[in-house]
Image (cartoon, rainbow, N blue to C red):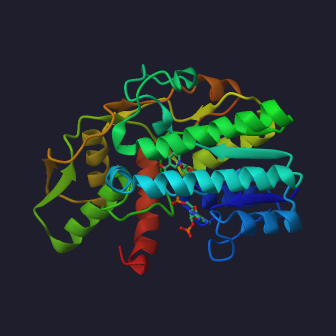
Amino acid sequence: MKIFVAGHRGMVGSAVVRALQRRGENQVLTRTRQEMDLTDPAAVEKWFAVEKPEQVIDAAARVGGILENSRRPVEFLIENTRIQNNLMESAFRNGCKKFLFLGSSCIYPKHAPQPIREDSLLTGPLEPTNDAYALAKIAGVRLAQAFRDQYGKSAISAMPTNLYGPEDNFDPESSHALPGMITKFHRAKVKGEKEVVLWGTGSPRREWLHVDDLAGGLLMLMEKYDGREIVNVGVGEDLTILELAEQVQKVVGYSGKIRWDHGKPDGTPRKLLDVKKIQALGWKASIAIEQGIAGTYEWFLRNAPERKV
Ligand SMILES: NC(=O)c1ccc[n+]([C@@H]2O[C@H](COP(=O)([O-])OP(=O)(O)OC[C@H]3O[C@@H](n4cnc5c(N)ncnc54)[C@H](OP(=O)(O)O)[C@@H]3O)[C@@H](O)[C@H]2O)c1
């Protein structure tokens, strides 16, 4: 089976490649951005016409935290719609049998009832700080459904919750909360600083899924799920940003204080996915948050200094 993993150098793509290799797949196709810019329709079509992958897992996207999303809505909207449109169109035009599109939990309305069920999509206004990214992802979900409705193609969409793990973005300026905390606590520990400043109030509740758990869930969906409706991929439990900070602080071994910068946005008050659907398919997250943070910090210590974090 020829499987193309788009975005294989990213956090999700690299975890999917590791999971496929563990499963013994030996025809995993990958391309770097330099080899194939996925926003370029001609380059994408040319490659698919030659390689004709039977399955595609689309883990390529422009991804970022609250600040980056609110500063660059143009790039988030244009690049993400281009990447998903090019991939889906060329894949199906060239014989792809199954396509997995990756959305995100931020596609759901800001005040969706918790835990968020798949059918709450498009039932209310989005969180404004990342609405451009969310709208691009909603367009991707709709495109997958349209390929199924109009052409009978097997396109499925998975909505992961907040992720963390190896290959994450650890730059606190553009990262998600968890990897940003790892960097901040680590730097403060190394420099002997007395306090660490974290964004917001610490009160929003978030769910964190280790990316290796996600990869297992995605491969299960590729095997067992062939439906039109989106599928949430999460843990089913959340914790406050304050509780998360205390966990990260403990793993990093930083003994100073945390100061909360209330001038920075909190984002959505709570984001917990309802995971009954994926659990009914026989999958459940298995990496506990303490264990996941510890493994991620080990990866950070081995790799991040080279990346000048
Ligand atoms: N991170 C999360 O918490 C999270 C949560 C829910 C859903 N997701 C979804 O999961 C997917 C992957 O996210 P991630 O966190 O793995 O992101 P990531 O680490 O930033 O990886 C994205 C990958 O896409 C590639 N890419 C971006 N633009 C490209 C282009 N024009 N041409 C070729 N490659 C391009 C990047 O290539 P380079 O290496 O060259 O930059 C990178 O390898 C996204 O669809 C995202 O929405 C992520």
Please determine whether, in this image, residue 78 is positioned above or below residue 46. above
Position in image of residue 9 (x %, y %): 60, 67
Position in image of residue 165 (x %, y %): 49, 56
| Observer-nearest of 168 and 107 | 107
Q: Is residue 274 left or right of residue 113?
A: right
Q: Residue at 33% of width from left, 34% of height from top?
A: 268
Q: Is residue 72 left or right of residue 41?
A: left
The quarter in which the N terminus is drawn is: bottom right
Please determine whether, in this image, residue 47 is positioned above or below residue 267. below
Q: Is residue 285 left or right of residue 253?
A: right
Q: Residue at 42% of width from left, 56% of height from top?
A: 294
Position in image of residue 193 (x %, y %): 13, 67
The quarter in which the C terminus is drawn is: bottom left
| Observer-nearest of 75 and 66 | 75
Please determine whether, in this image, residue 129 is positioned above or below residue 47. above
Q: Is residue 275 left or right of residue 308?
A: right
The quadrant where residue 111 appears? top left
| Observer-nearest of 85 and 295 | 85
Q: Residue at 66% of width from left, 33% of height from top?
A: 283
> Total marks drawn?
0
